[in-house]
């Protein structure tokens, strides 16, 4: 089975700092070596799927500039086929400057670049079982007009029998995504979405535009809310608090793309999973996407909901530990991942 990964792709530029950086004008401050890597949903999710030996394709848009060459080179070095990467003339490649001082959370300075123009109309869905789209708040062409582009893409996928998967991102209240009609977008898109896997922070950022209760809602309550709007399977990650999973009823799952329709016995599940404690800390960057990849790997394998949450937790921990360049237990099936993770079932 194959997963097509599409959506947001960028270059992460991370300068090293031994002390918190300053923006004081007229001063020179020392910085360490610059780490250059690929980020965004496409790179992070595909990297984990590769580690799990799950067949996948990647598609996204990059610009016509020097950073585009960096993207293509790194993707190829990581073992991904770059045939689905569109190079847009007169556009720029997306990048993020990642500021992570010791003992402090990360800050991102982000340039959307070619992501704003990407609409995914040329994605090849032949032999694809799950189409995963990441970060609509950073994909203007797909998300404007109440998500008309996503509706078109997901409708095409569902018509081909392909299950659909969606991950969100934090909405910048000062950015263009704050002007989208998120209530209508979710009402239109989630009934076409078989799997949705945002973080609690993603949904908190949507609270002013969708539901004020999302600002304080638990991961479990938020997962249930996404299912109520129409999603088939909803997993919400909540940092150190772990994960929550909720699913629609058997009828909803049976109407999904084939990879999810065969999991009709997942119907009505409500589960919580403890986070798997990392043995070492490298970076939390990309951990949410790794969790999504772990979930998708388990779904492809036909695993149980409990095993799927364990797979998500283990993949996230491996990402935080910097182990995504090593084979993980349970590769391909996802079943062997994080057997020690505790999963609790709740009465619906």
Image (tube, rainbow, N blue to C red):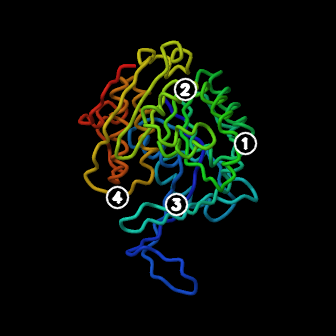
Rendered image: mark on residue 282: 4
Extreme residue toward the top, this view: 251
Q: Position of residue 55 (x, y in %)?
A: 47, 35
Q: Secondary structure at mark 2?
A: loop
Q: Are marks 4 and 2 in contact (CB under 8 Å)?
A: no
**Left or right of 319 in this view: 64:** right
Which residue does the numbered mark 1 point to in the structure image?
144
**Left or right of 240 in this view: 3:** right
Total marks in image: 4
Rendered image: mark on residue 304: none
Q: Are marks 3 and 1 in contact (CB under 8 Å)?
A: no
Q: CA distance from mark 3 to mark 2?
A: 31 Å
Q: CA distance from mark 1 to mark 2?
A: 20 Å
Which residue does the numbered mark 3 point to in the structure image?
12
Which residue does the numbered mark 2 point to in the structure image?
231
Q: Position of residue 296 (x, y in %)?
A: 45, 33
Q: Secondary structure at mark 4?
A: loop
Label 3 vs 1, first from the N-terminus = 3
Q: Position of residue 197 (x, y in %)?
A: 49, 36
Label 3 vs 2, first from the N-terminus = 3
Label 3 vs 4, first from the N-terminus = 3
Residue 332 shows in the view: yes
Residue 84 shows in the view: no
Label 1 vs 2, first from the N-terminus = 1
Could you tell me which quadrant the C terminus lies in?
top left
Q: Secondary structure at mark 3?
A: strand
Q: Secondary structure at mark 1?
A: helix
Pointer 2 local density, CA inside 10 Å: few below 14, some 14–19, many at least 20: many
């Amino acid at each position: 089975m194959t997963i097509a990964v599409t959506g947001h792709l960028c270059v992460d530029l991370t300068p090293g700092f031994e002390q918190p950086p300053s923006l004081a004008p007229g001063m020179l401050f020392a910085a360490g070596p610059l780490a250059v890597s690929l980020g965004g949903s496409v790179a992070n999710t595909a990297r984990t799927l590769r580690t799990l030996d799950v067949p996948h394709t990647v598609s996204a848009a990059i610009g016509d500039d020097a950073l585009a060459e960096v993207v293509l080179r790194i993707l190829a070095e990581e073992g991904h086929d770059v045939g689905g990467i569109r190079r847009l003339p007169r556009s720029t490649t997306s990048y993020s400057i990642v500021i992570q001082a010791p003992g402090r959370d990360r800050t991102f300075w982000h340039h959307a670049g070619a992501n704003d123009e990407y609409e995914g109309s040329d994605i090849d869905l032949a032999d694809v079982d799950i189409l995963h789209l990441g970060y609509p708040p950073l994909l203007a062409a797909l998300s404007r007009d109440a998500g008309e582009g996503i509706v078109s893409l997901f409708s095409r996928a569902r018509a081909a029998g392909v299950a659909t998967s969606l991950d969100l991102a934090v909405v910048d209240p000062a950015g263009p995504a704050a002007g989208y009609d998120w209530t209508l977008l979710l009402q239109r898109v989630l009934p076409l979405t078989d799997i949705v896997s945002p973080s609690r922070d993603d949904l908190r950022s949507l609270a002013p535009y969708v539901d004020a209760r999302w600002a304080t809602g638990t991961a479990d309550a938020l997962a249930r809310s996404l299912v109520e709007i129409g999603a088939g399977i909803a997993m919400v990650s909540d940092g150190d608090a772990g994960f929550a999973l909720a699913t629609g009823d058997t009828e909803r799952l049976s109407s999904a793309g084939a990879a999810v329709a065969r999991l009709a016995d997942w119907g009505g599940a409500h589960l919580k999973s403890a986070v798997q404690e990392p043995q070492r800390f490298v970076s939390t960057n990309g951990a949410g996407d790794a969790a999504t990849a772990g979930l998708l790997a388990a779904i492809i394998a036909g695993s149980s909901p409990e095993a799927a949450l364990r797979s998500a937790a283990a993949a996230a921990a491996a990402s935080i530990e910097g182990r995504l360049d090593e084979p993980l237990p349970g590769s391909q099936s996802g079943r062997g991942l994080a057997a020690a993770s505790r999963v609790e079932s709740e009465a619906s």
